Amino acid sequence: LRVAILPIGNELLDGRVVDTNSKFLGSELASLGIETTCILSVPDDLKSMLDSLRFAEKRANFIIVTGGLGPTSDDITREAVSEFIGRPLVMNNSLLEEIKDFFKRRQRAFNPINEKQALVPETATIIPNSWGTAPGFIVKKEGLTIAALPGVPAELKPMWEQTLKPFLSPTKKLFVKGFKTFNLPESVVAASIPELDGVTIGYRAQFPEITVKISGFDKDKVERAFDIAKSSVPRDSIFTEDIHKSLPDLFAHSKFTIAVAESCTGGLLGKLLTDLPGSSRYFLGGVIAYSNELKESLLGVTTLKEFGAVSRETAASMAKGVRGKADVGISITGIAGPDGGTPDKPVGTFYIGIDTNKGTETYHFFYPGLDRDRVRKIAAYEALNLLRKIVL
Amino acid sequence: LRVAILPIGNELLDGRVVDTNSKFLGSELASLGIETTCILSVPDDLKSMLDSLRFAEKRANFIIVTGGLGPTSDDITREAVSEFIGRPLVMNNSLLEEIKDFFKRRQRAFNPINEKQALVPETATIIPNSWGTAPGFIVKKEGLTIAALPGVPAELKPMWEQTLKPFLSPTKKLFVKGFKTFNLPESVVAASIPELDGVTIGYRAQFPEITVKISGFDKDKVERAFDIAKSSVPRDSIFTEDIHKSLPDLFAHSKFTIAVAESCTGGLLGKLLTDLPGSSRYFLGGVIAYSNELKESLLGVTTLKEFGAVSRETAASMAKGVRGKADVGISITGIAGPDGGTPDKPVGTFYIGIDTNKGTETYHFFYPGLDRDRVRKIAAYEALNLLRKIVL
């Protein structure tokens, strides 16, 4: 089965709305092992829609049209599909009753403009919509099937779940494994991993994470490729071997408690550590010591005069000062820029301090050429990665 | 001018990534008065890409290809465009130097795999990329122009701004005004604002911000429409009347200093307050009091037993406890979910406390139906909005 998705609506073309339906459907289809071969949006006019159906027909044997099922004059999905398959639109009376019923349940007067929504191409199978007034439908044209769903995500999603998803039973099961790296450019990750037989290797960069995803229909080949790919990348750059998990997941089942002292990251490390529910099991909290005054008053730092705020000594002192009853105290102090750099400590320099009952360690990092946002992100990720190593 | 957008990449078809670039470009083009006539994604293979270029050519005289400019074997935009316009790929040596230079600036060894990124179709004009290793290019084929941009939004956006936008901008001067709202759904904002003559109104939602952008060639009409649009939206939901400024900008020129005490947001408020350079002028830092223990030990909170961590009393006590030498102490405590809700205090409940030399105020909020990430974001934004009102 090859699927084409046709999201309808001028609001997608002029950027008023972001098309989340295609992402939803594409990802649902992929999880069924079904390939999406094209996503095509054109304006709300009959000729454009017929063009897009013709293009999609060449690339797919199943077309999902989303949107254009509303009651207004620019909703022309019904007309376009009807013309495309050469079957007239007919009034479906039981559907009309259901739409009238929907208005009754919401205690609103029925608007005759909505009668149009009970029109479907002759021979169509109805996809019921209990969440709105726009029913969907499925029609066939020789080897091709076309399904029409409303564009409102809150209607499209349950209609997909209840009707289309069961209808599109998977052919073969797709196996997916993957891992995430965090401090290498995509090109370096990709160059490290050889081409592997019988699997597809995908890369996705969302700074500072690179996700490496291996998929295929042969489970053994996927497993083997996963092992080869993983061992091709520097061990230190892999922070999770489960594609569905972000770093903080790793802490959830450890017995360590963590306290943070953040300067240049301003709270970002704490935010990342609390992104997932249940984080109170391992995260106690900490101090955002953005000003020197707070570094001294809340953390008892005494190294500022001699060594400066951005130094190994201050990182160590911040980590010690914040640990309290936690197992690990971790600190970040650095220069995120764009100002504040010096020849000795240019923008992109940061120190991380870690204090445990075994003593205090400090780490120096330098990431030149990154903007403020990225320096802060990579600093927080380096801290997460150091925490990961302690926890494991 | 009619534009077709071709977002390239299997990750768009299988739903790993949502295509925000097309929304960005569609909305930018609309604000220049340029129509987007199709958005078409196909898989990363040469035949599919040629098919999509052929389809786009029929609907547009300007094609923007996004993505597929990376260094790996599945990046084939260069090859596809080269074949489509019938011009070979040639190595651009000055581009190669620039890419090598990019590696040098980041203090990384140049990877030969990246050499491929200096290949461009013969006769191409280069679109420089200072933000990554994937330069873009513009080529012509008779009446058709094709521009290729990298798919990474952080590279695509500035390259659009600096090169493509000026290239496509009408000779007439376009006037743009706008404002940002933060606690209303896009549909409510859009429904509040009437259609206005002679201007284009664009909406951009990036939770929890909605940007309303009014553009047109007649300055007076834009000014008038801006005033009408602004007064159509509840005053309390507008947090900046300058479209280019985020909330923290407003604090930079005030004389107030701020300290934060965060529970459920875990550092997010501090992170947002320090997103911009120069934030040390107004932000002192604070405490991430995620655990009850730290609420007591670092903030001197004594209300936990009687009122609970999520209460007006604790919010007030946290704000008082953190203020110290700052002008404003601000606290957030709430239930971000998905667990931890009670009938009295369901998920989505949060309290904000504000302590100044005039006393302590507390505010109760309830946002039902949002996920953890969104509850935390809206809580941080409500805090920023309260800070805005104090500062103004």
Image (cartoon, coloured by chain):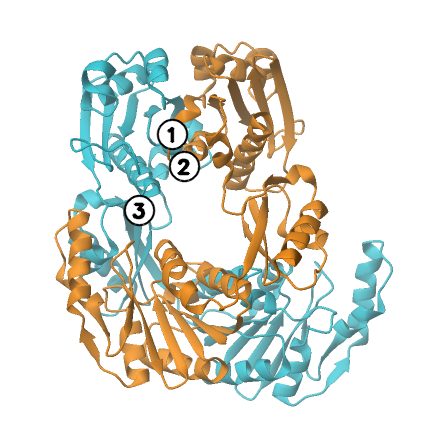
Chain colours: A cyan, B orange
Q: On what subunit does the disc labeled 1 rest?
A: A
Q: On what subunit does the disc labeled 2 rest?
A: B
Q: Amino acid at mark 2?
A: Asp
Helix, strand or loop for disc 1: loop
Find disc 1 in the rendering and name its residue.
A266
Helix, strand or loop for disc 2: loop
Q: Quadrant of residue A343?
A: top left
Give the side of residue A224 with respect to residue B30, left or right. left
Query: Which numbered tag is attached to residue A208?
Result: 3
- Residue visible at 19% across and 47% down? B106
Query: Which numbered tag is attached to residue A303?
Result: none
| Label 2 crowd (10 A; few <14 / some 14-19 / many >=20) | many
Find disc 2 in the rendering and name its residue.
B275
Alpha-carbon distance for marks 3 and 2?
17 Å
Q: Amino acid at mark 3?
A: Pro
The residue lying toward the viewer, choosing from B147 and A96, is B147
| Callouts 1 and 2 close, C-beta under 8 Å | yes
Alpha-carbon distance for marks 3 and 1?
18 Å
| Callouts 3 and 1 close, C-beta under 8 Å | no
| Callouts 3 and 2 close, C-beta under 8 Å | no
Image position, residue A194 (x, y; %): 17, 63
Image position, residue A111 (x, y; %): 84, 65
Helix, strand or loop for disc 3: loop
